[in-house]
Image: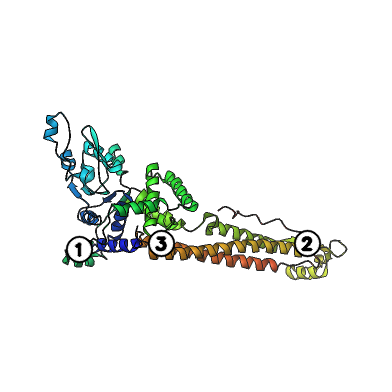
Amino acid sequence: MQPDRVARLRALIDTLEHGLVERRQSVRLCLLAALTGEHTLFIGPPGTAKSELARRLHTVFRDARYFERLLTRFSVPEELFGPLSIKALEEDRYERHTDGFLPDASIAFIDEVFKANSAILNALLTLLNEREFDNGAGRQSCPLISAVGATNVVPEDEIAEAFFDRFLVRLPVAAVSSEGFSALLEAGRARDWTPPGPELTLDGDDLARLAADAAAVEVPANFVAVLAELRQHFAVVTIHVSDRRWVKIVWLLRVAAASEGRPAVALWDLLLLPWLTAPDAPRQAAVADWLAARLGVREAFSPARLTRVVAAFVSQLDAELKANDLDYDESGRLKFSATELATELADEIGDAKGGAAAPRLSYNRRRRYGESHIGARVRQIDSLLERIAGYAREIAGQRENLAAYVLQSLWLNEGLTARAAVNLAATAAAIDELAARAKAARAGFLDLPRLERDNGTVPEPVAHESLDAA
């Protein structure tokens, strides 16, 4: 595609968004789905600009034919696929005139799509997925780029579920918020909207070049690892995502990367997944929470795990500070202390007879440690501090990476990037605090009471959770 691809798409997005209040993410994902050759389903009440979005999308593609229909439970196939051919019937053939109907459209908008009967839905399944329409004894190739569906609710039955899965992007659309109400009224004053000019519109060659570039986009191993973890999470929370959908999701994210001139998909592209995986707004919000909390934060170095490791060293220091030894003299015999101990006890218990003056073992001498012991502990903490510092640098790099990504992203929801940025900042602060605790423990080990001569004893490593997992 031309070097001006990003500028062109950005101008298209600005044009499509003009005059629409709180529909930015809907516009962008609807366009991205069309560039990918996928379909979008808007879920929400009437009067929320669903049909307007579809009509505007149609103007993006040069010479595109548009089809729109509102379905009811009384709709018949002729309304979508065209009337039967009388001439063909006279020749004992069952064929339709499809010119000007859905099989002939490039962009289609089907309102109240789930109100269609099973015959219509079954025909739509093939048309949406394979771009073919069974017309008589043969199959007719369809030029469909993208279909936009709209519904108030998604019914729960086998046919509806299969049809629902054909829409890769599922966008709940709500009424404009209280904060955007004034802007909505102001936008209503200017009803005219100017479609994008011919210098911006896309044709088949543009889409083919974008697809070729997307095929060359790399999918890194850490990206696949997050997808695999999310797939396991879905098995627990019972969100079903078909194998076919996972493949389409990765292709859409490749197209997103190619459209911005990137050679590989980024972790932050996964922030688009709520609308590509979960079926409704509450579960999409849960997926968004899961992603915002994990992206850029490796589980092996999560603050929770590091906290347990640092706590193990702090506990070990506390144990060594409180440890006592029997008190030996230079000849190796246990020391006896009579005078000093007797004086203390007599003061405490009023020992008039001096019974406390009997010789006693001074068993409560504070334990002392050799240079070998202390040096080993310090080396263990230095190794931990080095790992923590490396992770702090990694988090800082992720924060810079996210900031750069946000500046160039055409498709991402700013609310989600902001949440991910907040989570990374909180992680960085937690890592700094843990580093400070580890340094304090290091200083504590250095201040342990020492033997006059090193006994050569090297302690066992502090038992803690390993940080070796990636």
C-alpha separation, residue under disc 3 versus residue under disc 2:
58 Å
Q: Which residue is mark 1?
A: 194
Kindly give the residue lying farthest to the top in the view shown. Answer: 92
Residue 302 spot, x, y in % from top left: 53, 57
Q: Nearer the viewer, residue 299 or 347?
A: 299
Is disc 2 surrounded by few (<14), some (14 to 19) or many (20+) residues within 10 Å? Answer: some
Residue 127 spot, x, y in % from top left: 26, 41
Instruction: Name the front one of labels 3 and 2.
Output: 3
Image quadrant in which you'd find residue 267: bottom left
Q: Residue at x 37, y 62 (%)?
A: 409
Q: Which residue is mark 2?
A: 363
Name the side, left or right, on which 72 lies relative to 458: left
Q: Nearer the viewer, residue 200 or 441?
A: 200
Q: Residue at x 31, y 61 (%)?
A: 9
C-alpha separation, residue under disc 1 versus residue under disc 3:
34 Å
Q: Which residue is mark 3?
A: 419
As helix, strand or loop, the secondary structure at mark 3 comes to helix
As helix, strand or loop, the secondary structure at mark 2 comes to loop
Q: Report whether residue 242 is seen.
A: no
- Give the amino acid at mark 2: Tyr
Instruction: Name the front one of labels 2 and 1.
Output: 1
Instruction: Name the front one of labels 1 and 3.
Output: 1
